[in-house]
Image (cartoon, rainbow, N blue to C red):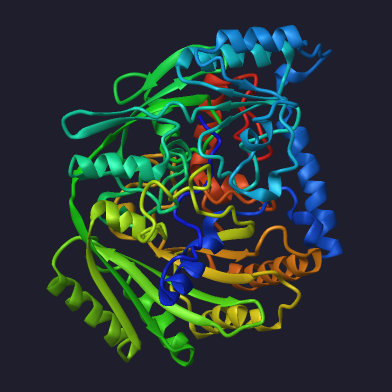
């Protein structure tokens, strides 16, 4: 499956109204991408030593069986043969004009990675040819859909990237849609909207559908229709031995189960997905603000409201600040239904808070326009909403961690949450620095699924939190260090109030006990499935599932 680890964040844009830009700074940029392998260099010395040692252990334990023993690297002739074997004949190698852009991930912090080749695959046979090549010559391999891996694990030094972005066909059936694994999220939404249907998913427009679905898929329609992975009916996967299988309820059902939250890059290279669709043409979007002086009441009110209300309503809350600046709090969300019904729900929120918002913004939008709005692209449109040629979205570096919360915060917990954001006022030396904690409400359809019904185990959470800090690339080393220190301290302070679980799509290279944090009691079964389909651990990275 493709190595893609993000879903519900977007990027900041400079071509929108100031209020919306401030909202997107919290809602989007700060969570669009995460830090990863380089994070340890910015921690204090004790943390650095611990993280470096852990990384060494992870790398050692992740070393695939197939890489053991003498290695004879491929020659130029071997690479040329691989290129001829691809139906696209599109294999980009170091030294070629296209290489610099071809090797880029979304996160600019990983621009220094130098893969030995990027193979653009259009068919399952192309993928199989790549896997045969890396097995024969003992070349590390990573699959890439949208390239949003928080830790940079969609690429690898001196290895082969199997890029599936050319697998982007979309076919509709009766109540279903089959989509190629390289389809970007916003293009998927555009196709769905043209047919008057929806599949729940995240907000970042350039995320690949593969990583989103394989790791779960939290988004604005999750409380009414479930996670992206909950709507997955079938998946086609190319295994390490080149075999192409289909996982559904009647064949290879264990592969379907593992693909519903078992994380990208673990079991094979996914080439297509079939999802259930839901009739949907429009929805309401809302955005509310309160003064920071009422932030404690807003946090308490929101957490006792958002996870419990009608599943047609999804809500998030953001506490954010620019480095060295004043904090702000906002509540946003979507609703599938009438404005009158939404008004009734928001009135309940105001009651919990003890006052109405200082600003209120409610708009009815088409499904596609709503997703453009959530992506920060409502004023630039579909064609410009990306980071490639012709697009206007920036590649934004950041560092992020996550927590699931299964209990409401008491007054001490709320004070800790506010103090962390207020601490950004002391951060200095940054370039465009900002930080946030973004909370996404769970409950509704998400929590109606049993923890072992899919690989996604997080079915009792009230909300998901992501701690993030973002800066303008490349930034200053001192400023980035200060921002990372802030985020690490914030996470350490608030983490004891959380459940101990983290979101596998917000992969965190510095996370201790990631097996339990991401997968809980489902990890043992995932290891058994890994042993069945990839016994030699061809698909490996520092936090990949180990064969049992």
Would you identify the image quadrant in which residue 326 lies? bottom right
From this view, report whether residue 114 is shown above or below residue 478. above
Residue at 67% x, 16% y is 134
Question: On the image, which quarter does residue 370 sit in?
Answer: bottom left
Rendered location of residue 384, percent (x, y): 43, 49
Q: Is residue 60 above or below residue 249?
A: below
Q: Is residue 344 left or right of residue 361?
A: left
Q: Is residue 120 left or right of residue 247?
A: right
> Which residue is at the front of the view, 330 or 414?
330
Q: Position of residue 315 (x, y in %)?
A: 34, 67
**How many numbered dots are placed on residues in this image?**
0
Query: What residue lies at 57% left-to-right and 21% top-to-bottom?
Result: 534
Q: Tell me if I can see residue 486 in this picture.
A: yes
Identity of the residue drawn at 29% across and 85% down: 350
Residue 195, above or below 43:
above
Percent position (x, y) of residue 112?
Answer: 75, 42
* Up-down relation of residue 404 to residue 456 (above or below): below
Residue 61 percent coordinates (x, y): 74, 33
Report if residue 499 is visible in the image. no
Left or right position of 422 against 445:
right
The quadrant of the image that shows the C terminus is top right
* Pick the front one: 63 or 169: 169
């Amino acid at each position: 499956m493709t190595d893609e680890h993000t879903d519900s964040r977007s990027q900041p844009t400079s071509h929108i109204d100031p209020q919306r830009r401030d909202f997107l700074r919290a809602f989007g940029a700060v969570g669009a991408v995460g830090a990863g392998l380089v994070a340890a260099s910015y921690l204090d010395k004790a943390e650095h030593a611990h993280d470096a040692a852990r990384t060494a252990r992870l790398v050692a334990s992740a070393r695939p069986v197939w890489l053991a023993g003498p290695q004879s690297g491929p020659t130029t002739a071997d690479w040329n043969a691989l290129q001829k074997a691809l139906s696209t004949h599109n294999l980009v190698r170091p030294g070629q004009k296209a290489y610099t852009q071809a090797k880029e991930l979304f996160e600019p912090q990983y621009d220094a990675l130098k893969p030995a080749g990027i193979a653009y695959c259009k068919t399952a046979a192309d993928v199989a040819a790549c896997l045969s090549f890396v097995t024969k010559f003992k070349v590390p391999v990573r699959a890439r859909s949208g390239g949003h891996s928080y830790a940079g694990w969609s690429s690898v030094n001196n290895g082969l990237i199997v890029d599936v972005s050319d697998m982007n066909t979309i076919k509709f059936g009766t109540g279903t849609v089959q989509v190629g694994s390289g389809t970007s999220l916003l293009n998927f939404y555009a196709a769905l909207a043209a047919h008057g249907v929806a599949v729940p998913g995240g907000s970042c427009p350039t995320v690949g559908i593969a990583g989103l679905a394989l790791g779960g898929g939290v988004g604005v329609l999750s409380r009414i229709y479930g996670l992206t992975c909950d709507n997955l009916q079938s998946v086609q996967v190319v295994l390490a031995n080149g075999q192409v299988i289909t996982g559904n309820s009647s064949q290879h059902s264990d592969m379907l189960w593992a693909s519903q939250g078992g994380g990208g890059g673990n079991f094979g290279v996914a080439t297509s997905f079939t999802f259930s669709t839901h009739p949907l043409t429009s929805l309401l979007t809302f955005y509310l603000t309160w003064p920071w002086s009422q932030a404690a009441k807003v946090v308490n009110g929101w957490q006792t409201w958002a996870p419990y209300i009608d599943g047609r309503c999804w809500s998030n809350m953001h506490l954010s600040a620019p480095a060295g600046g004043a904090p702000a709090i906002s509540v946003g969300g979507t609703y599938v239904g009438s404005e009158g019904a939404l008004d009734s729900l928001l009135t309940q929120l105001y009651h919990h808070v003890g006052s109405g918002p200082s600003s209120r913004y409610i708009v009815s939008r088409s499904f596609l326009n709503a997703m453009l709005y959530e992506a920060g692209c409502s004023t630039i449109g579909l064609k410009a909403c990306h980071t490639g040629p012709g697009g206007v979205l920036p590649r934004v570096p950041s560092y992020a961690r996550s927590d699931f919360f299964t209990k409401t915060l008491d007054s001490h917990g709320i004070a800790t949450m506010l103090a962390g954001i207020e601490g950004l006022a002391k951060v200095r030396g940054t370039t465009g620095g900002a930080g946030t904690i973004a909370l996404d409400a769970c409950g509704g359809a998400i929590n109606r699924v049993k923890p072992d019904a899919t690989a996604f185990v997080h079915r009792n959470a009230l909300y998901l939190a992501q701690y993030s800090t973002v800066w303008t690339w490349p930034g200053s080393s001192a400023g980035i260090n200060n921002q990372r220190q802030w985020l690490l301290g914030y996470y350490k302070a608030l983490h004891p109030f959380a459940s101990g679980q983290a979101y596998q799509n917000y992969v965190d290279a510095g996370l201790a006990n990631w097996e339990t944090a991401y997968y809980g009691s489902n990890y043992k079964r995932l290891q058994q499935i890994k042993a069945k389909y990839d016994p030699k651990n061809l698909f490996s990275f520092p936090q990949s599932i180990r064969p049992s």
